[in-house]
């Protein structure tokens, strides 16, 4: 039957309205819900449904269920090829079925579940970038029977649904990316704050000391005094170079691995003890050596070890230093011990020990400092990570 031009323009008007409605939301669930309502209105159907292809199982799923019995549809899954909807999903060709009961492809279980009798239906594929992502179905024309013009209308609507779904998915993806970026930025900011603190505590402190000593040396008159100041300046500048090197290594090479950290502890330890004729011995036990601890943890552990070693040089008069470093599934443990004079009772605490303790807490562990003869600084993240052999001087 030929449509009158009046009827046709009315339907086109409805189609435009429906397209605008579907495209006015970026919520995928809303798009689906509106698609079903629009399909019903557009072709004057008693019911409509939207089935989306679940790529993981290659089944068709009733994404949105409307109406009293709609809930039951949520549990229904059709294999591609099952029922008229499954056939359309597989072949990608729109179908107009005027007598469903006599169509061999018809799947009556859905009618049984909904307490509904399907007389006639239109089923069209929903395509996104040439790929079938679902099917849109309109069931039982309220007056008379569906016509081929209704198939064209529903197909046009299906194209709009596909675009709206694409936009909604893209929006959802963008939102997720944005959230990820915000949290990465926060993480970046806190790492930046910590690096600034390290610059201040490390290079900042060293440079300030070098500056004070050089000013003093310039004002001083005795050669011996100047030589003494120069010796300390030389020591401090060596520390500064080591600090900058480790800092740049961390930033330039990205994140180092556990193996890199173990190697850096070995290199730094032997480099700073050697000029003082101190024997240096290091034992590393890294079970996940190629994994990256992250720049933050890496720097923190290195700084704890470095301050403990600097203290040994400055205060201990030790002949031997031992470092034990363990990292694995049981946690992290780092011990630096010397055989020097030990902590003097009531010794004035500088910034080093306090900083080490604070850093230990910031990386989720704790620091113990014991003094027998000699001194032992131990960091660990858990009881089980603590060194197996207890410290004994
Ligand atoms: N291995 C050690 N052997 C002997 N004494 C130590 C050892 N480590 C620390 N101390 C003592 O503990 C004190 C506090 O150490 P801390 O690192 O906090 O300060 P500092 O080294 O004196 O100064 P800063 O670290 O701020 O430059 C030292 O002054 C020193 O008396
Ligand atoms: Mg110190």
Image (cartoon, grey):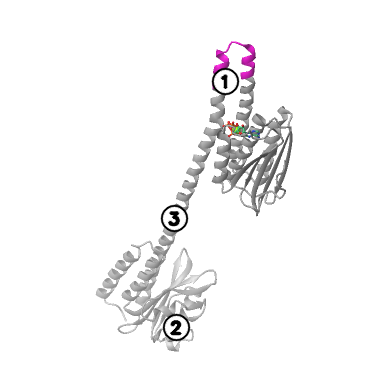
Residue at image location 53% in from the left, 25% down from the top: 208
Residue at image location 43% in from the left, 84% down from the top: 113
> Does label 1 point to a residue whose CB lies under 8 Å from ligand 1?
no
Camera sees residue 72: yes
For the residue pair 266 and 145, the one nearer the viewer reads as 266
Q: Which residue is mark 2?
A: 110
Q: Which residue is mark 1?
A: 213
Per the image, label 2 sits on a secondary structure element best described as: helix
For the residues marked 3 and 2, what is the alpha-carbon distance in whole angstroms?
A: 36 Å
Front position among marks 1 and 3: 1
Mark 3 and mark 2 lie on one chain; the one further toward the N terminus is: 2
- Quadrant where the image shows the C terminus: top right
Q: Which residue is mark 3?
A: 174
Residue 16 placement: quadrant: bottom left
Highlighted magenta segment, given as a residue range: 212-229
For the residue pair 366 and 58, the one nearer the viewer reads as 366
| Residue 52 colored in magenta in the image | no
């Amino acid at each position: 039957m030929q449509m009158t031009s009046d009827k046709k323009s009315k339907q086109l008007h409805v189609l435009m309205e429906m397209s605008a409605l579907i495209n006015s939301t970026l919520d995928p669930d809303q798009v689906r819900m509106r698609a079903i309502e629009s399909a019903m209105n557009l072709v004057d159907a008693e019911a409509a449904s939207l089935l989306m292809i679940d790529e993981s199982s290659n089944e068709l799923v009733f994404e949105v269920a409307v109406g009293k019995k709609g809930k039951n549809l949520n549990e229904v899954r059709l294999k591609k090829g099952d029922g008229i909807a499954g056939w359309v999903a597989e072949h990608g060709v729109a179908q107009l079925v005027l007598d469903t009961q006599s169509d061999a492809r018809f799947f009556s279980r859905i009618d049984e579940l909904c307490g509904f009798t399907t007389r006639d239906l239109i089923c069209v594929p929903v395509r996104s970038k040439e790929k079938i992502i679902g099917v849109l179905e309109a069931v039982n024309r309220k007056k008379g029977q569906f016509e081929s013009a209704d198939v064209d209308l529903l197909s046009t609507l299906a194209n709009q649904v596909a675009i709206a779904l694409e936009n909604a998915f893209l929006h959802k993806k963008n939102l997720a990316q944005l959230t990820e970026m915000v949290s990465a930025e926060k993480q970046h900011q806190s790492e930046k704050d910590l690096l600034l603190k390290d610059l201040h505590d490390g290079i900042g402190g060293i440079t300030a000391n070098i500056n004070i000593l050089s000013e003093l040396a310039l004002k001083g008159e005795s050669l011996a005094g100047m030589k003494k100041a120069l010796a300390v300046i030389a020591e401090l500048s060596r520390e500064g170079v080591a600090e900058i090197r480790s800092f740049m290594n961390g930033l330039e090479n990205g994140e180092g691995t556990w193996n890199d950290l173990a190697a850096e502890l070995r290199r730094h330890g032997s480099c700073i003890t050697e000029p003082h004729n101190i024997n240096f011995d290091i034992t590393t036990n890294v079970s996940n050596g190629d994994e990256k601890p992250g720049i933050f943890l890496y720097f923190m552990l290195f700084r704890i070890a470095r301050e403990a070693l600097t203290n040994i040089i400055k205060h201990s008069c030790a002949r031997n230093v031992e470092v034990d470093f363990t990292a694995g599934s049981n946690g992290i443990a780092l011990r630096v011990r010397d055989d020097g004079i030990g902590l003097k009772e009531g010794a004035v605490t500088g910034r080093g020990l306090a900083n080490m303790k604070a850093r230990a807490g910031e990386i989720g562990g704790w620091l113990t400092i014991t003094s027998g003869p000699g001194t032992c600084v131990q960091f660990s993240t858990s009881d089980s990570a603590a060194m197996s052999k207890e410290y004994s001087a």
